[in-house]
Image (cartoon, helix red, strand yellow):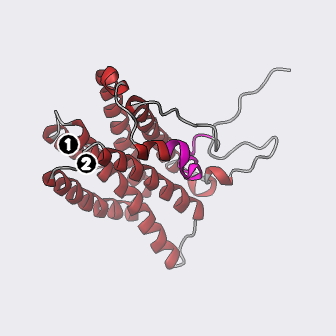
Amino acid sequence: MTRILVGILVFVINTLYRDRPYPRFYVLETVARVPYFAYMSVLHLYESLGLWRKADWLKVHFAESWNELHHLLIMESLGGNDRWVDRFVARHAALAYYWLVVLLYLFSPRSAYHFMELVEQHAYHTYDVFLQENEAALKAEPAPAVAVNYYREGDLYMFDEFQTGSKPETRRPEIRHLYDVFVNIRDDEMEHVKTMVACQRPDAQKTFRSPHAVPEVEGTESPILPPKPATSM
């Protein structure tokens, strides 16, 4: 089912926006935010009913939505939402996918996370192809102010929070031109993939943690980060 939902989304976006990259990315980023909203909605419901309380999950999913928000703001600054019809398509697709993911998360959280893993993998591939095909043109364009603020000058705690595959403060991207902006957006999508994979682990309810909550104790391996390689004496 998850592959069918992703396949429909990809087909519609690829068909309608084949030769219009910024509106295409605007629609993609608008839809990409809503599964994280859906996860948080259901988690808040569980907490309100006294069924399950996991603050770390809420923190990470909010940080993921915050990251996708800034991708969206970047696309808007590039004119991706200039046409009314593009805003119409993006918002109605987002509304539909929000409720689909809410229902999916209620019945099968692992399937809901797998859905988003596939979406983020598609986004990574889309941006990677775009970078390969437009490298020279992108390097000739300045970086939007919103991208500089998010990646270099903004709330970097939030930037670190969604990257459960890395320790905080280890990734500080360069922003010299528009090419760098899209490199970082592409790399963000892979970080989302890693986090969605971590959420699907059989022991995730016991081991999943916010990156900032991982104890730095000598000899203790992180429940999220990969084990450290053994060093020879």
Percent position of residue 74, x then y? 36, 45
Secondary element at tag 2: helix
The residue at 71%/28% (across/down) is 229
The residue at 14%/38% (across/down) is 15
Residue 106 marker: none
- Please say if the residues under marks 2 and 1 sit with CB atoms less than 8 Å apart: yes
Secondary element at tag 1: helix
Q: Nearer the viewer, mark 2 or mark 1?
A: 2
47 vs 223, left or right, is: left
Mark 1: few, some, or many residues within 10 Å (few <14, many ≥20)?
Answer: some
Q: What amino acid is labelled 2 in the image?
A: Val
- Whether residue 132 is visible to the viewer of this picture, yes or no, is no
- Whether residue 1 is visible to the viewer of this picture, yes or no, is yes
Q: Earlier in the sequence, mark 2 or mark 1?
A: 1
Q: What amino acid is labelled 1 in the image?
A: Ile
Residue beneath disc 1: 13
Among the 4 quarters of the image, the one containing residue 23: top left
Residue beneath disc 2: 27
The residue at 28%/50% (across/down) is 1
The magenta stretch is 150-166
